[in-house]
Image (tube, rainbow, N blue to C red):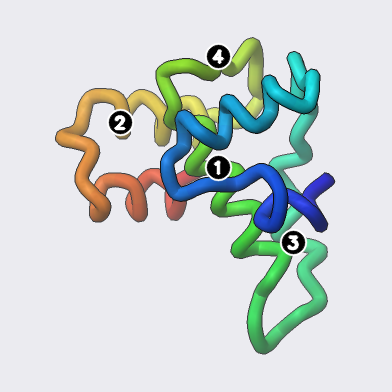
Amino acid sequence: MIFTFDDYIYNKDIDKTVDNFKNIGMKYILVDLNTPTIDKDQENHTLTNRFENLLKTFTSERLQIIDSDSICLKTAIDLYNRSNKTPEDLNNYVKLA
């Protein structure tokens, strides 16, 4: 799924991304938060970039994270939700998550 995420699902408007997930019938997504660690593209980091776009989707108020064992993700989402939600806040969220 991550290979086609940017081409068919991701939109810079994260609510549209959530709509795209729903339109293809996805109700749940299981995500391995270690995915960027297997990125073999040392020059462009294409897997990491796609993964970061998925992380941005997690900030949508229309999406619910059911559970995570990642304290970094939970903290990042909490800090982002309490922020002014500027582009800089979003970048900080991605770095922490």
Q: Nearer the viewer, mark 2 or mark 1?
A: 1
The residue at 41%/18% (across/down) is 61
**Element on which disc 1 rests:** helix
- State the residue in front, 73 or 25: 25
- Give whichever of discs 1 and 3 has the lower sequence position: 3
Q: Residues within 10 Å of mark 4 (few under 14, many from 20)?
A: few
Residue 95 placement (x, y as % from top left): 44, 54
Q: CA distance from mark 1 to mark 3?
A: 15 Å
Q: Quadrant of the N terminus?
A: top right
Q: Determine which of the numbered discs, if any, sits on residue 37 in the image.
A: 3
Q: Judge whether 72 appears above or below 90 on screen.
A: above
Q: CA distance from mark 4 to mark 2?
A: 16 Å
The answer to whether residue 32 is left or right of residue 66 is: right
Q: Nearer the viewer, mark 3 or mark 4?
A: 4
Q: Nearer the viewer, mark 4 or mark 2?
A: 4
Point out the residue furthest to the bottom here.
43
Q: Amino acid at mark 4?
A: Gln
- Determine contact: label 3, label 4, CB under 8 Å: no
Q: Residues within 10 Å of mark 1 (few under 14, many from 20)?
A: many
Residue 5 placement (x, y as % from top left): 72, 49
Q: Determine which of the numbered discs, if any, sits on residue 64 in the image.
A: 4
Q: Determine which of the numbered discs, if any, sits on residue 55 in the image.
A: 1
Q: Nearer the viewer, mark 1 or mark 3?
A: 1
Q: Which residue is the site of mark 2?
A: 79
**Element on which disc 4 rests:** loop
- Give whichever of discs 1 and 4 has the lower sequence position: 1
**Element on which disc 3 rests:** helix
Q: CA distance from mark 3 to mark 4?
A: 25 Å
